[in-house]
Structures are given as C-alpha cells and as structure tokens.
Image (cartoon, rainbow, N blue to C red):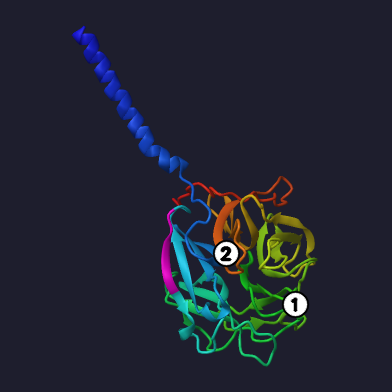
Amino acid sequence: MRRLAGFLLGAAVLLAAVAATAADRAPAARAHAGNPVFPGWYADPEAAIFGREYWIYPTYSDAYDRQLFFDAFSSPDLVRWTRHPHVLDARDVAWARRALWAPAIVAKDGKYYLFFSANDIHGDREVGGIGVAVADRPQGPFRDLLGRPLVGAFHHGAQPIDQSVFRDDDGRYYLVYGGWGHANIARLKDDFTGFEPFADGEVFKEITPEHYVEGPMMFRRGGRYYLMWSEGGWTGPDYSVAYAIADSPLGPFKRIGKILQQDPAIATGAGHHSLLHAPDGAWYIVYHRRPRGETAANHRVVCIDRLEFDARGFIRPVRITREGVPAHPLD
C-alpha cells in the first residue's frame, strides 16, 4: 500500500508539474494585444518594422491647438508596447504652430525620416502643409530637415495633408498624399529634400479614385499596385477604408470596395490606417476607431487586426475585434 501511495503521490506531483509548465506556456501562446493596443487618445497610426521591433507613430488626438507633438510606440511582439514620448515636437519645427498629424516613417541609409502634416492650411497664402524631419534612431529625437514645408501649396485641389511614402521595387520613393477629396503622387528625390519631375515634366499627378476622401497609402503585391484610402467623415461613425488596384503607381485606380468599417457592437469610425507585413508573410492593418458610446471627435484609439487576401489578390473585409491579434515576435 505504501508503494502504491508513493506511486500515486509521485504521479500527482509529475502531473502537477506538467500542468504548471503548460500553464506557464499558455499565456504566451494565447496572449493577444487587445484593442486598443495601448492607452490614450491617438489616431492616424503609421506602422513600420525596424530590425526586430514593430513601431507605431500616431497622431496625438486632441484639439488642433494641442496637437503639438508626436509620441511613438515600439513592440517586440505586437502585444507589449513601450511609449517613446515627444519624438518630434512643434518647438523643433520653426514653421509649425498647430495641428501636427498623420506621420509617415521611412528608414533609409541609416537615417529615419518622419513626414508629417502641420498647421491645417486652407490656402496657398498660409504657411504649412507637409514637412519632413530626420533622426538617427526610430525613437528620435527628430529635427526638421528643410526648415520649411516639403509641400506647402495646393496641387490639383489636394490639401497638403495625410502623406504616406511608398518605395517601389526599383528603389524609387513616392509621396502619396491629399485631403479635401483629392489624392496626388509625386516622386521624391533620393535625399527627400524635394521632388523629381515625371517624364512629362509634371511634378504632382492626381490619382484620385472614386469616393476618395483622405488618408492614402500605397503598396505593391503580386506585381500590382494597391491604393488604399479613407472614406466618410472622420468625426462620424461611417469613417471607413476602401481600396483600388492598378498596374502603375500613377493609376488609373479603379475602386474595388470597402474593407474596413464600423461594427456598432464593438466600435465606430474605423479608418485612417497603415499596414504591417511581417517577414513570415503575415499582414496586419493598424487603424484608429472610436470606442462604442464615444461621440467626441478626438476620442480615437489605435487598434490592430489581421489583413488577408483571397486567391485572386483581393483584400478580404476586415473583422474588427476587441481581442486584437496574438503575439507575433520578430525572430
């Protein structure tokens, strides 16, 4: 009996140890980021991968006169996020006085370039538009590269805001931007200090698709060019994301449909996004939305959900979630 009791006790200890080990491992296997992915009112998130870290650069979502800086957030796995405060401050941009928003980030030749909108200009006589800052590290501090806006005027009716930067497979960089229902593309110089004219001598070309409002971004997949943008009003529940596909970065882009929009049971105003493409092929959409029950224009939060394509290369509609995405380390 003693031997049997000892055997049973040993077996119980072993099972407990196995169970404990499984429990220790389970949180890592089941861990989800949760949406929002970090606290605070933030919007217009720009996402990037630098080395073995994910980065998000959002707008600080507040009244325009208080949007005077950018914070950044880094993560090794999409679940644990570290805040890097004031990576760029309006005090370090002589011409910026209010409304810093919609950052875009590019790593090139050992430097990090942060493109941003400032001042919310409504005409060519006002100072403001799209600027660019540079730093030696992704967490900054960033400093103004030009001492003036990179794009400081309206072209083809596009307010100079909501810029993104697209790098084509041939190494050329393009600025894609525009508010007020117009989208433009321009080819950047290699040092990002200005633009190279296209073959016909034009610097800014309009590529506006049907129902476009603002927040454009471009990527290439399967030899085709995808243009994505936000539709609806940014303060309302119908804010959403749609896309088009073309054979050239200059279009023409034919609208295919919406892929991100509100789910009133979870959140409203889902829009102004960017994408992450992990080395193993996984795609994620990083976007802002307004928590259920919130009506204040600037009460927006940053969220991440999966992005998937069908066999023909079309983007599947995104299901917005509360749990977010599971941990995905960059090994």
Query: Does label 2 or label 1 sit earlier along the sequence?
Result: 1
Residue 43 shows in the view: yes
Considering every residue shown, the one lying at the far top of the view is 1
- Where is residue 94? Give x, y as percent: 50, 89
Picture quadrant where residue 161 is located: bottom right
Q: Is residue 82 magenta?
A: yes
Q: Nearer the viewer, residue 124 or 174?
A: 124
Considering every residue shown, the one lying at the far left of the view is 2
The residue to which callout 1 is attached is: 205
Q: Nearer the viewer, mark 2 or mark 1?
A: 2
Kindly state the secondary structure of the residue where label 1 is placed. Answer: strand
Q: Residues within 10 Å of mark 1 (few under 14, many from 20)?
A: some
Callout 2 amino acid? Arg
Reply above or below: 61 against 195: above
The residue to which callout 2 is attached is: 300
What residue sits 29% from the left and 21% below the top? 12
- Residue bounds of the magenta highlight: 80-86
- The number of callouts visible is 2
